Image (spheres, rainbow, N blue to C red):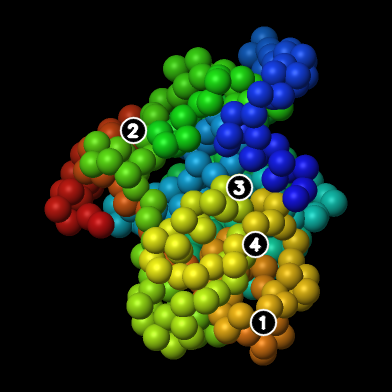
Amino acid sequence: MSLEQKINQAWRTDAGWLWLLLPLSWLYWLLSTVHRLIYRLRIKKPFVSPTPVIVIGNITVGGSGKTPLVLALIDWMGAQGIKVAVISRGYGGQTDTEQAQLIDAQSDPRIAGDEPVLIARSGAVVCTSPNRAAAIKLLISDHKPDLILSDDGLQHHALSPQARWAIVDTARGFGRGWLLPAGFLREPVSRLKQCDLIIKRGISADCDLQIRPSHFYLLDNPDLKLSAEELMQRFGDQALALAGIAQPERFFDDLQHMGFNLTPRALDDHHTYASQDLVTNLPLIITTEKDAVKFRPEWLEHTPIAVLKIEAKLSPDLRDRLSAELIRLGVLANGDILPNDHQN
């Protein structure tokens, strides 16, 4: 088990020894506060885009559902006739430059990052750079979008967006409310008061966002949709489950509830895969879309690989609030809004 996995397990189980890390959390708070004040007091001037930018972020570490939400927003906004582009830091990539790079479906996730490539494969225009201003300028120059979504970036104070939307995982909550590393908060809960929209993820009917399994597809035949039952009819119920995501337990739990007899293999978030990671005597490998973008074609010659497709469902109330936000930003006019019963 890696250090990252040990820390995640400690947060999940509320391990008693975490209080020993509180002095480091206080130091983290001090440094992050100074960083924020540098931009708030205009000691350094944050970049303001001429095209509206909405940051989709959170105050917790990993696994809140930002990327599925971004994909759902791209679909929903596209249905409104809005030309959307996406910027990303490119976490998980290994680029050694701050130069902005346009990402497409064929981009190497080892360089561009797994999440940007996953978003680009949906057909969206994506640009990555640690320098968000450079990414925004390139998008405006080359694609002239109506709106730019920032996948993460709530803590990136060098950018002053027109709106900040925060996603909150109601099942996970905020733990003890401790900042990193004693807790899993990037910022205090009070930070949410500075956000323009709070999006609550959960499974109950009153939540804004539900993220749930949709279907499976085989990596060498992505157009073929399969249910869990159909997948087990083909390969049996035994499978190696691979997940290099922030909270792999959710993925494993979903598969077990479907009836699979799993051998789970949890890896670090944004794990860089090698062929030996896929070595197994089991008849099937099941993985996530975020992991699957990093698999090379030659790895498909041995064990069949199935990918679990997830879908993010926006509640009618959330769609109404999203529409109000877009009208406020001048991106959408009242007459352009689709009725809720015509939206997915």
Q: Amino acid at mark 3?
A: Ala
Q: Residue at x 58, y 34 (%)?
A: 13
Q: Earlier in the sequence, mark 3 or mark 4?
A: 3
**3 left or right of 309 in image:** right
In the structure shown, which secondary structural element does the residue marked by tag 2 occupy?
helix
Name the residue tied to disc 1. 281
Q: Residue at x 80, y 54 (%)?
A: 95
Q: Mark 3 to mark 2: distance in Å? A: 29 Å
Position in image of residue 33 (x %, y %): 69, 14
Position in image of residue 110 (x %, y %): 75, 63
Residue furthest right in the image = 96
Q: Mark 3 to mark 4: distance in Å? A: 13 Å
Q: Earlier in the sequence, mark 3 or mark 1?
A: 3
Name the residue tied to disc 2. 325
Q: Earlier in the sequence, mark 1 or mark 4?
A: 4
In the structure shown, which secondary structural element does the residue marked by tag 4 occupy?
strand
Of the residues tagged 3 and 2, which is closer to the observer?
3
Q: Amino acid at mark 4?
A: Arg
Of the residues tagged 4 and 2, which is closer to the observer?
4
Q: Mark 3 to mark 1: distance in Å? A: 26 Å
**274 left or right of 314 in image:** right
**208 left or right of 252 in image:** left
In the structure shown, which secondary structural element does the residue marked by tag 3 occupy?
loop
Q: Residue at x 64, y 14 (%)?
A: 40
Name the residue tied to disc 4. 265
Q: Amino acid at mark 2?
A: Glu
Q: Residue at x 44, y 33 (%)?
A: 168
Quadrant where the C terminus sits is bottom left
- Residue 300 picture quarter: bottom right
Name the residue tied to disc 3. 246
**254 left or right of 299 in image:** left
